[in-house]
Amino acid sequence: MSLLPTSLQAPRFNLTVPQPDGQPGVIDAYLALARQPDAPGVVVLHEMLGVNADMHRICDRLAAQGFHALCPDLYWRQRPRALFSEHDNAQRDAALRLGRSFDADLGTNDLQHIMDWLRQMDGGARKVGCIGYCMGGLLSYRVAACCRSDASVVYYGVGIERFLDEAHTVACPLLIHLAEQDDFIPPTTQDEMARRLQADATALIHTYSNTRHGFARRGGRHFDAAAALLADERSSRFLAQHLHPVPTGVPADAV
């Protein structure tokens, strides 16, 4: 295992995490370290495009906010280190095919292992949450329902409607950001998600007017700067509230 600090010119992967269940081999990842060694952790779950510059930016931003941010290669079982551009139609189609073949059950199990690794990194013990985008958003929801997470954030999680029967098992705070005009999550699906998740999981859901899928992806075709900034600010406050320790004598709801 290697453990390297982030830098302005960091490589796409600067860390390896052991594979789960004692299997030989490693999972590539990008890690951005907070200033404080005992900081809480956030696992960043990439979109179908892979661990790209936008995922680096998210990790670096979270590290600056006081979180150890780890973005693992979710494609390690299928096509390790896969990377795609949404601006190339052939690559975009290849990303869609690979993402659709992704095994969400195996991926969720992998994430419990990765979260446990980050929780105990350097021999300590810390709170750990997840933040996921698109395919990673689905996994962040499933982590909230099936794993030991301390908080989960979802950006336009495609496919959550297939796992709404797990809503009642969500055991951590859950924040969801939805694009009003999402090409992959139609209004009827969004309405059903909101109804089930707010009833069974008490999820906090924000819908962003006149936005499309991927509205928070810097450099993306549907990037919306105002909506992305608002969503990111909400996510930062949410993660800080639920992952950072509360000062002695301060009520939790005052943070």
Image: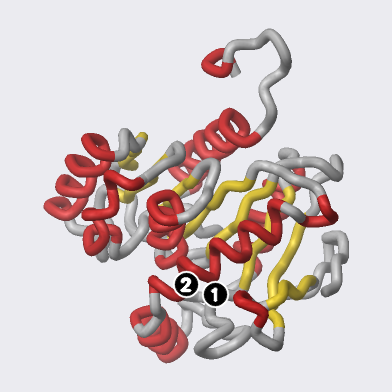
The image shows residue 134 at horizontal and vertical percentages of 41, 63
- The image shows residue 146, relative to residue 1, as above or below, that is above
Instruction: Write down the residue under mark 2.
Output: 107
| Near-viewer residue (228 or 170) | 170
CB contact under 8 Å: marks 2 and 1: yes
Q: Give the residue drawn at x 85%, y 40%.
A: 36
For badge 2, the amino acid type reads: Gly
Measuring from the top left, give residue 168's x and y in whole percent: 27, 44
The answer to whether 88 appears left or right of 200 in the picture is right
Hey, which residue is sitting farthest left in the picture? 188
- Name the residue: 61% across, 75% down: 20
The residue sitting at 70% across, 81% down in the picture is 26
- Residue under label 1, please give it: 74
Distance between mark 2 and mark 1 Cα atoms: 7 Å
Crowding near the residue tagged with mark 2, few <14, some 14–19, many ≥20 C-alpha atoms within 10 Å: some
Q: Which sits in the foreground, 42 or 108?
A: 108
Image quarter in which the N terminus is found: bottom right
Kindly state the secondary structure of the residue where label 1 is placed: loop
Q: What residue type is disc 1 on? A: Leu
In-front residue for pair 233/44: 44
